[in-house]
Image (spheres, rainbow, N blue to C red):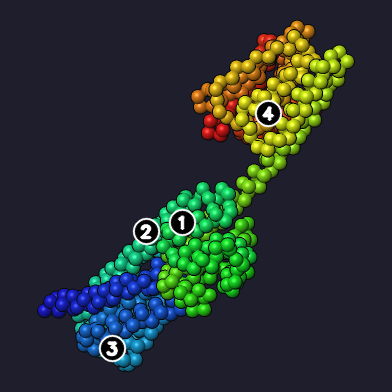
Amino acid sequence: MYASTEIQMLIQLIERAALLLISLFFLSRVPKFKETLQKENHSPTELTLITIIFCAFALFGTYSGIEVEGSIVNIRIIAVMSGGILFGPWVGIITGIVSGVHRYLIDIGGVTSIPCLITSILAGIVSGIIYFRVKKQNRWVYGIAAGMICEVLTMVLILVMAEPFSLGLDIVSQIALPMILGQVSIGFIVLMIASVEGEKERIAAKQAQLALGIANKTLPYFRSINSESLHKICRIIQKEIKADAVAITDTRDVLAYVGFGEEKYKNGREIISGLTKETIKSGKITIRNNIADHHTPQIHCLLIIPLEERGIVTGTLKIYYRKAYTITHTLQTMAIGLAQIISTLMEISRVEQIKEAANKAELRALQTKINPHFLFNALNAIASTTRRNPEKARELIISLSGYMRYNLEVEDELIDIHLALQQVHDYIDIEKARFGSKLQVEYDIDDVQIKVPSLLIQPLVENAVVHGILKRKAPGLITISVKDLGSSIRVSVEDTGEGIKEEIIDQLYRGEMSSRHIGLANVHERVKLIYGTGLVIERLNPGTKVYFDITKEKR
């Protein structure tokens, strides 16, 4: 008969635990409570709310219990243990104290009142220990074991404290098995809440993917940050997160605004929002889920996230919604990650712009060094021709004048290869006036359409003339070629002169070139800055070959 009664009590106990489980399930579907469940850390307000809920569950367990010989078969320990394991000792201990004291007060002097008080508080303490010491994936097992141990202890205390002993033995013999086995419900509750937390991880992964997708789509517009690119970035963000409006500001002005109310920010304007100014000042996120005093009355939801570069607030990302309470914890987390990505991209963009400006300045400085060098040699050539052949000197002066005027008028940093070769022609005309038949030049030019920096090839030809051909008494040949190699285009200058010394090549690659070879060194540095690798120099027999390759992707 006892066995049948015990099974019946166990079923009734599981039914009550099922009610608790169902209640938690429906609570987990409530967005606000679901967000609370998914958080790693909880505010005092959230912990207070959770504690009240589990206290209510524990009291429900007592009131819905089954009376047996002055004892109550209930699910109180299940509620206490579940609350502490899921949300920490604050919830477990307080729930244990409240439910234990309540159990004692409703049955002062009862056979089981003190044992239930002791084990209820003990269950709260043990659940807190499990929360801190046991890995999440194992807590449900430890919860079941701890719940069973607490009920075993309750039975022992009943036997020790009951008077007469036979009464305690009679109670324990009837309630021990269902009370101990019923603790299996702790595992079900912990696993169910864990599934909600697992859903949090899936949502987090989805939000991370969304943030990375936005970053990937906006990346091309960070290469040059301006009003137009920032508007496109805001437009992409607005579309992807389904916001009513998105804005990006610096510390003073609205740089871009798209979406609802956009007409107010067509040409940008100074920041007038006190919340934005406070965010910039404090560096902390601002969230308003039901704002009533916004300067656009239809806006009821606002999220302002500071953008930082090297730890300094440089602006904000602002997200607007017209519907109140739209900014969930998940959206907030995603937006924070997105703001961090935007901050990084903006910082990288600025660094790249500074680097590009520095490279351009360096290129201009290198070219400035080359111009006087060429001018000096050209004037020497004209001077040597003046007495011997005034008419030829006059032609050379006109050529030099046209050459210098051409260089002054060329504003593009990269010029067509054929214009660059015209520079070489002008230089060769002047040098031939000096050396006559001793200097011969051949051109081997493929039909290619590329651009190169001004005054990049001419110094190589000059180097071949001065340090190659003129070092030998016999006439020499310079071959200038531009060859299409398929994936790249090779520009080379080859001479049959004396040949460059190995130590000069080593000095060039080490960046230790002497002032006597300033033209070659400067071209090497410019080619390295523009194309990534410098000149390649080969010793021939006789002569020297100098070349560089331009990959077609970098034309």
To which residue does mark 3 refer?
111
Q: Look at label 4 and name its amino acid.
A: Leu
* 441 is higher (above) or lower (below) than 147: above
Q: Look at label 1 and name its amino acid.
A: Ile
To which residue does mark 2 refer?
202
Camera-side residue of 77 and 460: 460
To which residue does mark 4 refer?
456
Q: Look at label 2 and name its amino acid.
A: Arg
Residue at image x 63%, y 21%?
492
| Numbered circle sitting on residue 283 | none
Q: Circle 3: is it few (<14), some (14-19), or many (20+) Cα within 10 Å?
A: many
Residue 212 seen in the current view? no
User: Which percent across, then down, holds residue 418?
Assistant: 62, 26
* Direction front: furthest residue: 391
Q: Earlier in the sequence, mark 4 or mark 1?
A: 1
User: Which percent across, then down, holds residue 406?
Assistant: 71, 31
Q: Look at label 3 and name its amino acid.
A: Val
Q: Earlier in the sequence, mark 1 or mark 2?
A: 2
Q: Nearer the viewer, mark 1 or mark 2?
A: 1
To which residue does mark 1 refer?
236
**Quadrant of the frame with the N terminus:** bottom left
Q: Nearer the viewer, mark 2 or mark 4?
A: 4
Give the CA distance from mark 3 to mark 2: 50 Å
